[in-house]
Image (tube, rainbow, N blue to C red):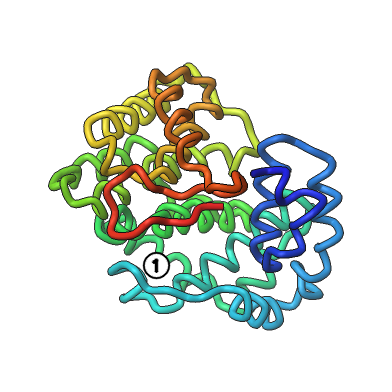
Amino acid sequence: IRDRYLDYNDDLLSFIKRIHFYQRMFLFFKSEYFLKKLIKEKNNYLCDLNIKKMIKNIKSQYFEFRNSVLHEKYENIFLLNRILFRNFFSNLIFGIDLSKRIIDYFGLEIFLNIAKDIIENPDYLIFSGSSGINFLYNVRFLLSQIGKDNEFKFNLEQLIKIAESVEKNLENKERLKNIIYFYTHLIINESGFYSRKLDSGKRVYRHILKKIENLIEKNYFNVSLDCKFEFLVCCKILNYSTPLFSVIYSEAKRSLSDIGNYLIDRHNVFAEQRHMD
């Protein structure tokens, strides 16, 4: 599957999907091959460092969906998150700081107000896919760039406690999916999307992994293959050996398309099968 998108077919992906693929592959594998790919796309990605052009670029590349109460309340949350991600990855990969330009364009209050609202409302934080938790970490990074870290703080224990307070009615597959996405993206964000090593012995990280592991074990066929892969990525980040690896890997092999170059989530209980690249 990875080879499908290397030298032969990556041009079939949209611009933003190529960027997403290259970023994650570069940061996860530390591969110069993917860094060169990103450098090739740099000008299109940075849009002359012009935020207005960047907004237009984002709107042209993404289908903006509203799939949660968070998206319903803040109709621009998707765009703001994309802008913040562009700031994060531009800084991480190219060493380019977009924070001043972003704040000059949007102001700082909009980011602070939404972040504070998210952390006070479990529906916004937990049940918005990964949007809520990603936004918190993106805002924290933005504040760190301008030396205003004290204006918005949170810690892992605080976030876990919020999640545990709503960890019920998990027979609802959407709630279960969102809880798992939340926990996996805690670890992924803590690692700076694979850019920094985490202390694999840190108790709170092990606690999160155990929680995800237990949720998948108890609800195996109600958990999407995508969520299971997210869990394995977190295990890799923290060098954690899970007994679920062989089970998930076996399912993945049985989920390959007939021609063997993409995955179909065919063994779990969902309304429709999902084509997964």
Looking at the image, the residue that sits furthest to the front is: 258
Instruction: Report the front residue among 240 and 104.
Output: 240
Tell me which residue sits at (31%, 49%) in the image.
177
Give the structural element (helix, strand or loop) at label 1: helix
Tell me which residue sits at (70%, 59%) in the image.
18
Q: Is residue 5 left or right of residue 159?
A: right
Q: How many marks?
A: 1
Identify whether 167 is placed above or below 241. below
Question: In the rendering, at what x and y percent does residue 52 appear?
Answer: 67, 83
Question: In the rendering, at what x and y percent does residue 263 appear?
Answer: 51, 47
Tell me which residue sits at (58%, 58%) in the image.
142
Which residue is the site of mark 1?
114
Question: In the rendering, at what x and y percent does residue 250 appear?
Answer: 45, 28
Tell me which residue sits at (33%, 33%) in the image.
212
Instruction: Report the front residue among 31 and 253.
Output: 253
Instruction: Report the front residue among 230 and 56.
Output: 230
Q: Is residue 37 left or right of residue 97?
A: right
Question: In the rendering, at what x and y percent does residue 264 appear?
Answer: 46, 50
Q: Is residue 97 left or right of residue 250?
A: right
Number of other residues with Cα within 10 Å of mark 1, as a class: few under 14, some 14 to 19, many 20 or more:
many
Instruction: Report the front residue among 259 and 151.
Output: 259
Which image quarter is the N terminus in? top right
As shown in the figure, which amino acid type bears the numbered disc 1?
A: Ile
Identify whether 54 is placed above or below 164. below
Identify whether 141 is placed above or below 255. below
Q: Quadrant of residue 155?
A: top left
